[in-house]
């Protein structure tokens, strides 16, 4: 079974995405509310995809992506964010879904 890590500050957001993945695609889901929590999970868990927000409480989403680029360069990353300010590191993700409002 594939495993997805959802990295987002808001628990309600994580829960909604998790429910969609669990019920629609039968995917194992891990959740992290901070960059450090995500890095800890990524070091000890087999993850097939990371869904990340650009704004995190302890570090920038770009910091996590930079870490991923050096430690897990083949791991796909999907950026889901409400921010319109996407920096160059975040633009290197496999896909960006910008805000629609």
Image (tube, rainbow, N blue to C red):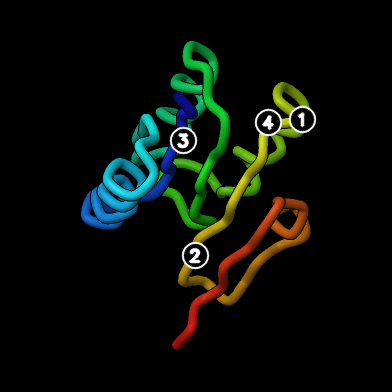
| Foreground disc of the pair 4, 3 | 3
Mark 4 near mark 1, Cβ–Cβ under 8 Å?
Answer: no
| Foreground disc of the pair 4, 1 | 1
Query: How many C-alpha atoms fall within 10 Å of the one at disc 4: few (<14), some, or many (≥20)?
Result: few
* Nearer to the camera, 3 or 84: 3
**Residue 75 vertical position relative to residue 54 in the rendered view, above or below:** above
Q: Earlier in the sequence, mark 4 or mark 3?
A: 3
Cα gap from disc 3 to disc 1, whole angstroms: 16 Å
At horizontal 54% and vertical 15% (from top left) the residue drawn is 43
Q: Earlier in the sequence, mark 3 or mark 2?
A: 3
**Residue 72 vertical position relative to residue 86 in the rendered view, above or below:** above
Q: Earlier in the sequence, mark 3 or mark 1?
A: 3
| Foreground disc of the pair 3, 2 | 3
- In percent of width and height, residue 33 lies at 34, 41
At horizontal 46% and vertical 20% (from top left) the residue drawn is 40
Which residue matches tag 1? 73
Point out which mark residue 4 bears: 3
Which residue matches tag 4? 67
Point out which mark residue 81 bears: 2
* Residue 70 appears left or right of 63: right
Q: Earlier in the sequence, mark 2 or mark 4?
A: 4
Q: Earlier in the sequence, mark 4 or mark 1?
A: 4
Please identify the residue farthest to the bottom as the structure is shown: 101
For the C terminus, the quadrant is bottom left
- In percent of width and height, residue 86 lies at 65, 66
Query: How many C-alpha atoms fall within 10 Å of the one at disc 3: few (<14), some, or many (≥20)?
Result: many
């Amino acid at each position: 079974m594939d495993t997805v890590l959802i990295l987002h500050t808001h628990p309600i957001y994580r829960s909604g995405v998790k429910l969609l993945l669990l019920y629609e695609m039968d995917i194992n889901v891990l959740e992290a509310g901070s960059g450090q929590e995500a890095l800890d999970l990524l070091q000890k868990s087999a993850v097939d995809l990371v869904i990340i927000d650009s704004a995190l409480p302890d570090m920038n989403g770009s910091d996590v992506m930079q870490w991923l680029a050096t430690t897990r360069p083949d791991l796909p990353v999907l950026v889901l964010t409400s921010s319109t300010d996407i920096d160059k590191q975040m633009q290197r993700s496999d896909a960006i879904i910008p805000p629609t409002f």
